[in-house]
């Protein structure tokens, strides 16, 4: 009898402890639900993550928490879509105005994405000239190209831009590959073109954009025989205008991708909330769509 009494007491203690943990878990779930209802989706998700960590055996509560987590993720996705829909027209209008100074070039046979080139920098207007050319593709990827024209090859691989006070910036070095760095000879003249895309060119582009309008920028072709020139006013204007357009186009591309990703996530979450598939054996919506 005495042993049975001890067992009964232990059972009561365990039952009370279990009830206490369940109540605590439900309180935390309710806090997460309030955060969700107030559209504090990130905070709600953090609260649910804590709930999962501290109460891993409260299966019924965790099932409700899983549903709430998906609802919070859906709320985030809806908010992202609303943000993109509100800002996208503004940025597209800006892009439309900026594009007026550019020519759109695209080889439909070889290129999937076209490029915007400042009108004064199209190749037809710059034959037999050494200069720095700039352009941006439809998705906002900017490039800086060093064009050399002369009787002898210099075999250059990049650029260094400098001001009279000694400050300077450089592009990345692009080894000869016949693509981003290519050369050809025509009627005894040598043409070399080295193209630095996006991150490889941004330091030099930012340097030009940040320099005073009247500052004289020296351009040295690096990696080969010494050759230099001074950046013309028109070429400097082209670089600045191209950078402005690149910023807007990159924003538009980012929002397009974010909206597409959010719509995909909503479709996934809706299928789970509707009961399609086993929740316990599927990744979270965030894992599925990232």
Image (cartoon, grey):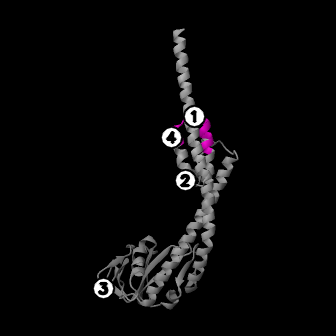
Rendering coords of residue 142 (x, y %): 49, 75
Mark 1 or 2, closer to the camera: 1
Classify mark 4: helix, strand or loop.
Answer: helix
Q: Residue furthest top?
A: 1
Read off the residue under disc 4. 53
The N terminus - image quarter? top right
Q: Residues within 10 Å of mark 3 (few under 14, many from 20)?
A: few
- Magenta span: chief secondary structure: helix
Q: Residues within 10 Å of mark 2 (few under 14, many from 20)?
A: some
Classify mark 3: helix, strand or loop.
Answer: loop
Whichever of callouts 1 and 2 sits on the residue coming sooner in the sequence is: 1
Q: Residue at x 54, y 75 (%)?
A: 248
Q: Is residue 249 visible?
A: yes
Classify mark 2: helix, strand or loop.
Answer: helix
Whichever of callouts 4 and 1 sits on the residue coming sooner in the sequence is: 1
Mark 4 or 1, closer to the camera: 1
Residues drawn in magenta? 51-66
Query: 119 or 98: which is nearer to us?
Result: 98
Q: Residues within 10 Å of mark 4 (few under 14, many from 20)?
A: few
Q: Residue at x 65, y 51 (%)?
A: 269
Rendering coords of residue 63 (x, y %): 62, 40
Q: CA distance from mark 1 to mark 3?
A: 72 Å
Read off the residue under disc 2. 42
Whichever of callouts 1 and 3 sits on the residue coming sooner in the sequence is: 1
Read off the residue under disc 3. 164
**Residue 50 is a magenta residue:** no
Query: 266 or 61: which is nearer to us?
Result: 61
Task: Please tell me whether residue 16 is drawn above or below residue 147 in the rendered image.
Answer: above
- The tag on residue 22 is 1
Q: Quadrant of residue 279?
A: top right
Mark 3 or 4, closer to the camera: 4
Q: CA distance from mark 2 to mark 3?
A: 50 Å
């Amino acid at each position: 009898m005495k042993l049975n009494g001890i067992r009964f007491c232990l059972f009561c203690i365990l039952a009370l402890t279990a009830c206490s943990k369940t109540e605590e878990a439900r309180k935390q779930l309710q806090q997460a639900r309030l955060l969700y209802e107030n559209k504090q989706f990130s905070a709600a998700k953090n609260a649910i993550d804590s709930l999962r960590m501290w109460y891993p055996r409260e299966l019924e509560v965790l099932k409700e928490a899983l549903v709430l987590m998906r609802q919070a993720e859906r709320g985030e996705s809806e908010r992202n879509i609303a943000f993109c829909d509100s800002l996208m027209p503004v940025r597209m209008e800006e892009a439309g105005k900026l594009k007026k100074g550019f020519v759109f070039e695209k080889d439909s046979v070889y290129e999937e994405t076209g490029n915007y080139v400042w009108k004064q920098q199209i190749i037809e207007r710059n034959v037999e000239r050494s200069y720095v050319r700039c352009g941006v593709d439809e998705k906002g990827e900017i490039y800086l190209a060093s064009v050399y024209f002369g009787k002898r090859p210099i075999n250059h691989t990049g650029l260094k831009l400098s001001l009279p006070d000694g400050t300077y910036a450089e592009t990345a070095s692009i080894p000869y590959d016949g693509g981003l760095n290519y050369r050809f000879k025509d009627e005894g003249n040598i043409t070399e073109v080295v193209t630095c895309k996006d991150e490889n060119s941004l330091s030099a582009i930012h340097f030009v954009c940040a320099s005073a309008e009247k500052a004289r920028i020296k351009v040295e072709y690096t990696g080969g025989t010494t050759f230099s020139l001074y950046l013309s006013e028109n070429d400097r204007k082209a670089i600045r205008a191209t950078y402005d357009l690149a910023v807007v186009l990159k924003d538009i591309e980012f929002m397009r991708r974010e909206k597409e990703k959010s719509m995909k996530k909503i479709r996934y979450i809706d299928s789970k909330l509707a009961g399609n598939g086993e929740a316990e054996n599927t990744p979270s919506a965030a894992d599925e769509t990232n």
